[in-house]
């Protein structure tokens, strides 16, 4: 006897995997979490004398910080990006 949770092996009762009528899922970033995360990155960079991350992490952070701050008010986003990049310039020059 087949379990009620198990789909039919031949797909007779299988739901559609790519339902074109399904509603689009949107993600909304939490501004408080964005501020906290970017703030931690900036604080970690400010406390360091050399780049505190490996090359891959540095490349990732330089790419995602400008994307993350898009969930914040424009002035705040610009300031956080500026602060982060200033620290990156300082650390990369060291």
Image (spheres, rainbow, N blue to C red):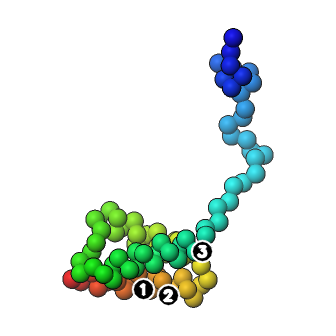
Extreme residue in the top direction: 1
What secondary structure is found at the residue carrying circle 3?
helix
Please tell me the numbered disc located at residue 31. Answer: 3
Please say whether residue 86 is visible from this viewpoint: yes
Asked if one can make out residue 11 in the rendered structure from this viewpoint, the answer is: no
Distance (Cα) linking label 2 and label 1? 6 Å
- Which mark is on residue 38? none
Give the residue displayed 38% in from the left and 80% down from the top.
Answer: 43
Q: Quadrant of residue 70?
A: bottom right
| Residue 91 left/right relative to 37 | left
Label 2 Cα crowd, 10 Å radius (few <14 / some 14-19 / many 20+): few
- Left or right, residue 80 beside residue 11: left
Q: Is residue 68 left or right of residue 42?
A: right
- The residue at 33%/83% (across/down) is 46
Please tell me in which quadrant of the rendered image residue 92 appears: bottom left
Q: Which mark is residue 83?
A: 1
Spatial separation of the CA atoms under disc 3 and disc 2: 15 Å
User: Residue 65: x percent and y percent?
Assistant: 46, 73
Q: In the picture, which quadrant includes the N terminus?
A: top right
Disc 3 crowd rating (10 Å Cα; few below 14, some 14-19, many 20+) is some
Residue 42: percent from left, percent from top = 40, 79
Tag 2–tag 1 contact (CB < 8 Å): yes
Circle 1 SS class: helix
Which of marks 2 and 3 precedes in the sequence?
A: 3
In the depicted view, which residue is nearer to us: 39 or 14? 39
* Closer-to-camera residue (88/50): 50
Residue at x 68%, y 40% (from the top left corner): 18
Q: Which mark is residue 79?
A: 2
Give the number of the mark in front: 3 or 2. Answer: 3
- The x, y position of residue 45, in whole percent, is 33, 78
């Amino acid at each position: 006897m087949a379990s009620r949770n198990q789909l039919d092996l031949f797909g007779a009762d299988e739901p559609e995997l790519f339902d074109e009528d399904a509603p689009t899922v949107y993600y909304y970033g939490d501004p408080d979490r964005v501020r906290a995360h970017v703030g931690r990155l900036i604080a970690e960079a400010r406390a360091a004398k050399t780049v505190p991350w490996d090359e891959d992490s540095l490349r990732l952070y330089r790419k995602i910080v400008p994307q993350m701050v898009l969930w914040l008010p424009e002035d705040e986003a610009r300031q956080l990006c500026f602060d982060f990049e200033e620290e990156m310039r300082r650390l990369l020059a060291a």
